Amino acid sequence: MATFHEFGLEQTILQAISNMGFEETTPIQEQTIPFALQGKDIIGQAQTGTGKTAAYGIPLTAKIERDHEQIQGLVLTPTRELTMQVAEELNKIGQFKKIRSLPIYGGQDINRQIKALKQKPHIVVATPGRLMDHMRRKTIRLHAIQTVVLDEADEMLNMGFIEDIEVILQETPKERQTLLFSATMPKPIQSLAQRFMIEPGLFSVRSKEITVPNIEQHYIEVPEKQKFDTLCRLLDIQSPELAIVFGRTKRRVDELSEALSKRGYGVEGIHGDLNQGKRISIMNRFKEGVIEVLVATDVAARGLDISGVTHVYNFDIPQDPESYVHRVGRTGRAGNKGLAVTFVTPREIGHLRIIENLTKRKMERKPIPTVTEAIEGQQRLAVEKLLEVVEQGQYQDYKTMAEELLAEHDSVTLVSAALKMLTKEPNNARVVLTEEPPLRVKKEKWGVKSRALRDGRGKNYRKWENKKKWSNKKQDVITHNSFG
Ligand SMILES: Nc1ncnc2c1ncn2[C@@H]1O[C@H](COP(=O)(O)OP(=O)(O)OP(=O)(O)O)[C@@H](O)[C@H]1O
Ligand SMILES: [Mg+2]
C-alpha cells in the first residue's frame, strides 16, 4: 500500500488525512488519486466501505483555490443522508486548507440553504432534485465548477435521475473534470456514462468478488409467514451492536419497526415518506446507539458509513443484485467484520442465484434458528453483561447486601436469579405484518425501471404506487402472536 505522501499533496491536506486516522491508502485511493490529480475523468469501481469518498474527496479538495470565492466542486448523491455524510467528510479533508463544503438537499428549509449559498462555499454536495430547485430560482450558479462527482454513479444514472443529471451537467463548463464512483457499475451504465466524460480512466479494483471478503454472507430459506419470528430469534442469538434490517416497501418498514418494537427491541424505521427532521433524528439516534436496530427501505442502502453496524438483515430479498451489494455493504466497512443474513422464500431462490452470479460468491445456507437457541443467546448475553460488571469492579456498595443474601440462600440460586433478571426472555406480543408477494425473477438483469419507480423518482411513480396499493388489498395479513 502507498502512503498519502507520495501524491505531492499540500501539507494542509496531508495533515487533515492524518488527523482522520488514515495512514495508508486503500487500493482505490492508490489508483485513482494520482490520476484524478492530473485532471482526468474517472470511472471508479471499488467494493463498499473501501474509501471511495476520500478517493475523489482528496483530489477534489486539492484542486480548489481557496481565495476564489465560487462553487468549484459539485458532488451529486442519491439521498439526503449521504449528502450530509459526504459534506462532512469533505469538510474534514479540507479543514486546514479551509475549504468549505455545503450539503444541499430536499426537506430542508430552502431559505436557510439560500443564505448558506451566499456564504460562498467552495464545494456543494447535493441531491439532484433540490439542486435543480436552486437552479430554477437562480440561487446557485454552476459556471465556475471545475469538478463534478457522481457518487453512487450507477444509481445517479438510472432512469429516475438521468434527466436531472443531464440538465445539471449542461449548466457546468464543458472542460470540467467528471468523476464517477460506485461499488457497482453495470455495463449499460458505463457506456451511458461515457457520454458525459472525456476519455475516462476506468478503475476497477474488485479482485474477484464484488463484495468485500470481511462480510460473512448467509441466507435462510424461510416461508413468508415465519420471517418475523426468524428475525427476532436471529437478533436474540446474534445480539448485534447495531443492525440494519432492510424491507421492500415503506409500509413494510413501518409495520416491521412497529412489530419489533412491540417485541421489545430498540428500533426505528426510516424511509422516504418521513419528514426530514424525523429522518435526521432517527439516524442520529442510531449512530449514537440509542436504538440498535434500524429498519429501512433502500433509501439507506447506499453509501451510509455508520461505524458499529455489525449486522445487516435482508428481511426481503432485494429487487436487484446491485441493491444486495450495497445493502450488505453497510457492514464490514474499513476492514471491520460484518455479517449479512438474507431471507429468501422458497419461490425466490432463483433470485438468490442471480445475486450470487453478480457477486461471484456463494452465500452460506443456514437453518431457521430455534426458540431454544434464541433463549440461549439471550442467556449468554446476560452472562456477558454480568461479567462485564465484575470486570469493571464497581460493585463495592452492593457487597454488604450480597453477604446478607448469601447467609440465607446459596450462591447458585442467587446468581441464577440475577441472570434471569438480566435475560430478555421471549416476548409473545401479538404483531401484524402484511404479506409481501414473492419477487419474480425479471428478464432485465439489473432492474433500472423497477428501482426508479420504487423509490418514487420515476414519472410513472404515482400510477405504479396506486396500482401497488390496489394489489396489496388482495394480500393476506399474517398475524404473529407466538414466538414458537
Ligand atoms: N485510507 C484509509 N484508511 C483508513 N480508513 C479509511 C481510509 N479511507 C477511508 N477510510 C474510512 O473507511 C470508511 C469507508 O469509506 P467510504 O464511506 O468512503 O467507503 P465507500 O467506498 O464510499 O463505500 P460505499 O460503496 O458503501 O459508499 C470510512 O469510515 C472512512 O473514513
Ligand atoms: Mg461511498
Image (spheres, rainbow, N blue to C red):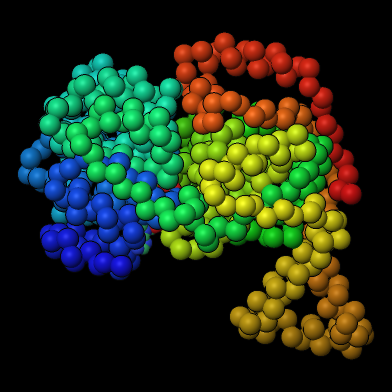
Q: Quadrant of the N terminus?
A: bottom left
Relative image position of residue 183 (x, y in whole percent): 42, 45
Relative to 168, say whether 302 is above or below. Answer: below
Which residue is found at the position 40% from the left and 34% from the top? 187
Relative image position of residue 290 (x, y in whole percent): 58, 53
Relative image position of residue 322 (x, y in whole percent): 51, 39
Relative to 389, say whether 259 is above or below. Answer: above
Front residue of this view, candidates 269 and 235: 235
Q: Is residue 329 left or right of residue 182?
A: right
Relative to 367, say whether 134 is above or below. Answer: above
Q: Is residue 343 left or right of residue 164?
A: right
Which residue is found at the position 16% from the left and 34% from the top? 176
Relative to 302, say whether 339 is above or below. Answer: below
Front residue of this view, candidates 56 and 250: 56
Q: Name the quarter showing ligand 1.
A: bottom left
Which residue is found at the position 67% from the left and 81% from the top? 390
Q: Is residue 198 visible?
A: yes
Front residue of this view, candidates 111 and 37: 37
Q: Is residue 130 visible?
A: no
Q: Given the current orientation, which residue lies at the most extreme top position?
A: 463
